[in-house]
Image (cartoon, rainbow, N blue to C red):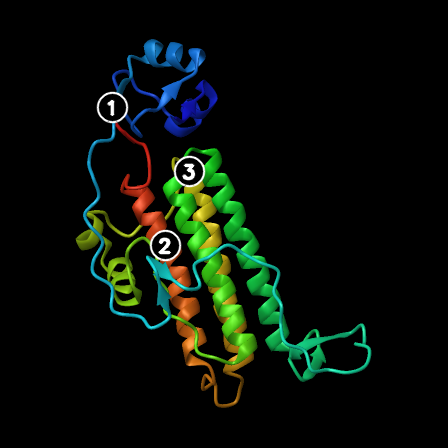
Amino acid sequence: MPIITEAELRDRIRRPKRGMKVVVSPGTRFSPSARDFIGQWGLEIVEEVATPPPPPALPENPQTSGSGPAWDKPSVFPVRPVKLAGPKPEHMTQLDAEHFAPKNIPRIRFRGKMDSVQGLTQLVAARARSWQLPELARHLDTLAAYCREIVSAEYNERPVAPIEVAGLDEAALRKATHHPQKALGIPHLTPGPDDHEILHWLNYLRTQMREAELDALDAFAPPPAYEPTRPDLIRALNRLSSAVYYLELLFKAGKLGWHVHP
């Protein structure tokens, strides 16, 4: 069961008010100093009892196995087929199974950006776990796996599998992030100084995914035509950043853990 310390309680509430209601996950416990802080301010602790609505039915996906998509699995060291002979020059890397390429071409830069984005996603998941937000962390684990799916599809020159996160497929995700008032009962958000730290981490992750989309456009929609040669990959990255925004909305709406009511 999660234990909340006084420092965590103060950081999450930011501006305590006497009699403020604090909603926590079922079974949450408090450290002795946190209990003193609750008593000092007369805080009302309420366990979350609302159950989320069942996820919408997902369209049948041939790349899905079991209860989730085939790509949603723990990371393993990438083993890529190699048919290259001879030593690799230091300034080059493996473009595919049969070719080396300079490390600073747009396609390799894009892979590097995706490596950074995946690492950041896992870092934010670790931060979520430190704040006793396991459901958010699980969704971020799924997005880290989808980063790996994008890179695998790019390297192997195959279509990217469609994204699924928090019970939503691509179409539902796009609809929810375009109309959050209808989907979650809250307006579009811009994190501010009174928001929880994890919301700022999520927002920063979203911006980095948007940058990855631009790197993909540099690699796969070059001038002068600017016509994407990998529209599936560009769409996947757009939906990836939308998925993070959806997690921001879920957190702000109090759907991913405890939240505060004035």
Q: Residue furthest bottom?
A: 225
Q: Look at the image and tell me in which quarter the N terminus lies.
A: top left
Q: Residues within 10 Å of mark 2 (few under 14, many from 20)?
A: many
* Horizontal relation, residue 259 to residue 153: left or right: left
Q: Residue at x 46, y 81 (%)?
A: 230
Q: Quadrant of residue 170?
A: bottom left
Sequence-wise, the earlier of marks 1 and 2 is 1
Of 195 and 21, nearer the camera is: 21
Q: Quadrant of residue 60?
A: bottom left
What is the number of the mark on residue 193?
Answer: 3
| Whole-percent x, y for residue 52 in the image | 22, 43
Q: Residue at x 47, y 59 (%)?
A: 145
Query: Label 1's element?
Result: strand
Of 217 and 59, nearer the camera is: 59
The type of residue carrying mark 3 is Pro
Q: Residues within 10 Å of mark 1 (few under 14, many from 20)?
A: some
What is the number of the mark on residue 245?
Answer: 2
- Asked if residue 86 is positioned above or below residue 75 in the image, the reply reads below
The type of residue carrying mark 2 is Tyr
For label 1, the residue is: 46
The type of residue carrying mark 1 is Val
Q: Nearer the viewer, mark 3 or mark 1?
A: 1
Q: What's the distance in space between the residues labelled 1 and 2, CA to CA?
A: 27 Å
